[in-house]
Every structure is written in structure tokens, then in C-alpha cells.
Image: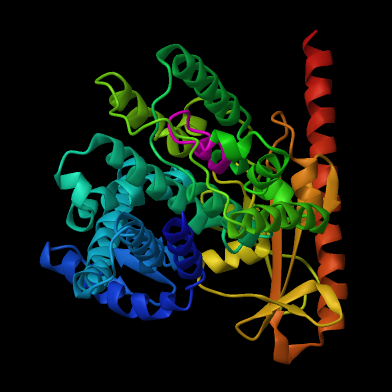
Amino acid sequence: MARNLIAVSVIFALLQLANLTELLSYLSRPMVTGTAILFGIEAFNRGTDIVLGSIVLPWTQDCSGVNTLIILWGVTLWANRQKTPNHLLLYKLLLCIPAALVANMLRIFTLAAYRFIFYPAWESDELHYFVGFLCLIPFLFLFVDDFRRMNRARWIEIVHLSLVLALLAAVIFSPGGTLVALSSLFLLAHTQFSVLEVRKYKYAYALWIAAAFIIAWSSMESLWIAWLLLSPRLAPWKVIFSWSGILILSGTVSVLAMHTEWQILVGIALAYRLFRMVRGETLNNLQARGIPGNIELPLLAVLALAPFSLSALIGLTHPLETPPAGIMARQITLNSYELNLTGQPTDMRMYWYGSYGDGRHHSLASCMRFRGIELEGVPGRPDVHTGGKMWMKDFYIHDGKLLDSYSDYLVASFSPFSPPGVHLILDAPAESMSVTYFSKKSIEIATSIFNSYMDNNMHFALGRTTTRVNTN
């Protein structure tokens, strides 16, 4: 158990290595464009995006390959945690870098092909993660001995770890992301493929599968990490079936983990479990090592796809939200626009983002982190962020309300029947105006957009009612 905790502690540190993004981008950009040119595809690196033939791909943090590298490093460390560190392990960790770059390049080309074939459809975040995971699997054979030795139980453990890390890498910089990572890695340290009575695990699988359909149908993506950690064969039930384990499991749900009060409760539970471990507690809740059956292995393979694809198949659908009529809007992608209002300061920019698919919007910090920009709070102005010499502020239009808090938005959109709403983002050069002026103008502009949106919806509803009356 001590080696497990050391391994997950190192993995947690790796999840914080976002500073590698620029270095990996420096290497991966020419790899992508150079390879495309070798295959006769016209390619350009324009800084904020990559042009591959007729396809323009925005260059984000994930495009650098940093998430792929972190997963490879984490899996390699976990697979070798019971061995004494040596030069061979160091070589493997170094080889993870070119492997991550190649896997990431394959991911980018796959997404470019998807966009070319299905244009103007926009690929979801879940599809990004899924394609990245598929491109990663062949490289696991290079760094995990158990994959080459046909140890099925170890396959499941390693793939399970990779899936959890893939989802963690996407939320680590969102509000409460640190607690989600700590809670998830603590539970991962206790996972091991176990043998259960046939009747028990069949019932457990039935409940687990039903939970997947409920999560996907309701588009409650924040529950997928907890769902993976509750895998019937791998979940550390002795830990989870305790007051501290339940709190730690709740800490993997970002909707809860972002609240200070919940962070304190989960922190107490984590401290309590660590104290008991320091006092010498051992957790041998697993009966024996087991071998998955011929039916169970493909079942688990299909279920592994649930967090990445099931929501797109059965999730509730909502119409795309477009800017209200009468406002100057320049379309950027399928459901994102740059807006321009009369009287808007020339230095300020206003963006309208509909949801990709039917999932909830990310926080402003997460959105910018995905684009390689790390935001910081402004002292004395918690409503404004700064990054890259810019002031930034965001709002959410949801269910007839204008919200300026991400936590308020998550609570308001928590219901499975709730639409994702609209994310409004404003920015301006910090040198062109004071933070106070920027905040004031942002509120005025967002309020004006919201009022136009509500007027537009009211006119649409009245027109629809009038048409129905006239028809009758």
C-alpha cells in the first residue's frame, strides 16, 4: 500500500505539470505540419491554430500532447511501482516523451479527418478524450509488461487507470479539480482486480450499467469519474462502505468538490484515512487475484467507452442557442460567435459560446486552460480574471437568468432536464483600461445581450402562439 500511495502521489504531481505545454507544443507543431506535408497535405502553423488542407484546427493545450504524456508517465510508474527504481525505468519514462508526441499527432489527424467528413458537425469534448485514449493504447504495450504477457486482470487495472487519468487531466484545472484528483487517486491506490461471488458481481454489474445509462441520459459528466471508480471488480468496497470513504468518493464529483464547505469535509476524511494508514492499518479487502471470463472482458471493453460516447447516443438533446437577432455576430465555429454591440468599447471583445453537444459549460479558467492560457484572480476583484495581459470576465445565460458565477450556473443546470445555456466571455487588454472600468462595462454589455436575448425569445414565443391561433 505504501508503494501505491507513493505512485499516486507522483502521478498527482505530474497532473500539475501544465508548464510542459509550451515545450511540447514547440515539438508537436512542426511534427504535425511536417507529416501532413509528407503526405501531400497543405499545412500551416498559424500560432493559435493549425491549417491542414481545408480544415482549420484551433491549437489548444491538449493539442500539445501534455495530457497523453502525463497518462503514459502515470501508467508506467503505476505498472512498475512494486519494483525497485532502476535505469530501465528511467529509460521508459524518457521514451514516453516521443511516444506521447506520436500518439498526440495521430489524435490530431484523426480529429481532422472527423471534422472533414462530418463538417459542419463539431466534435464533442468526450470525442476528443476518446480518440486520445484510443491512440494511446498501442503505446501501452511498450511500457507495461503485463500487456505483453497476456495478464488479463492487469490489463483491466491499467486500462482502468488510463481512463480515470484521461478524465482527471480534463478537470484538474477546473474549480475543485485538485480535490477531485486527490480523492480519485486515493481510491485508485486501493484498487485491485478481485474475485467476487458470481451472483454478487452480476448484480453489481447490472446496477453499474444502469447507472451509466442514467448518467449519459442526464448528461451529468461530473459523475463519470466516480462511476469508473465504482467498477464492481475494482472498487475498494471496504474503504467506500465507511463514512470517510463515502465523503472521499463524493470528492471526485466536481459539482460538489468546488464548494469550500465540501472541500473541508472531504479533506477531513482524507486526513483521517491517512492517519489510520500511518498507524499501521492494512486494507486487505480483496479475496484473491482473479481472471476475467471470456464474456466479462468484452463487456468491460464496451463499458469503458461509456464516459466518452454514451451521452452522445442517448443524452437529452437541446436546440443550439444562437445570438439574438439584430446584434452583429461573426460566426467562429458551428456554435460560437464574436459579438459587437453599438457603443461597445473598441478594445473590448465579446464572445458567445453555445454548448458543444449537450454537456455543461466549463468554467472560464478551464476554457482558457484548454487554450493554453493560465488565468489568475485579480486582487480585490474576484469577478475578474487576468492572463496574457488581458482582463477577462464571463457570464452564463441559463433558464431566463443572467448568472455571473460558475457555481451558480452548475447548481442551476444540475437537473438532467436542464439545457446547457450560453457562456458569454468578455476580454480587453489590461493596458487599455482599468479593471474597475472593464468590470463595469462587462456587466453593462452582458446585461444588454441578455435583454436582447430575452426580448428575442419573447417575440418568438408570441409569434409561435399567434401562428397557432391563426391556424386554428
Q: How is the image coloured?
A: rainbow
Q: Position of residue 28 (x, y in %)?
A: 29, 72
Magenta highlight on residue 1: no
Callout count: 0
Which residue, as the protein is rendered here, is positioned at the far top? 472
Magenta highlight on residue 232: yes
Q: Is residue 42 visible?
A: yes
Image quarter of the C terminus: top right
User: In the figure, 189 relative to 229: above or below?
Assistant: below
Residue 426 or residue 242, whichever sits in front: 242
Name which residue lies at 65% across and 52% down.
Answer: 273
Answer with the quarter of the image where residue 218 lies: top right
Q: Is residue 329 visible?
A: no
Q: Position of residue 347 (x, y in %)?
A: 70, 81
User: In the figure, 238 relative to 17: above or below?
Assistant: above
Residue 192 or residue 416, whichever sits in front: 192
Q: Is 170 left, or right, of 305 in this rendering? A: right
Q: Is 143 left, or right, of 15 in this rendering? A: left
Which residue, as the protein is rendered here, is positioned at the far bottom? 431
Q: Is 119 left, or right, of 39 in this rendering? A: right
Residue 78 or residue 324, whichever sits in front: 78
Q: Which residues, given as a range, are shown in magenta? A: 225-236
Q: Position of residue 189 (x, y in %)?
A: 48, 51
Answer with the quarter of the image where residue 405 lies: bottom right
Q: Position of residue 358 (x, y in %)?
A: 59, 38
Name which residue lies at 50% across and 14% down.
Answer: 203
Name which residue lies at 73% across and 34% down.
Answer: 418
Which residue, as the protein is rendered here, is positioned at the far front? 280
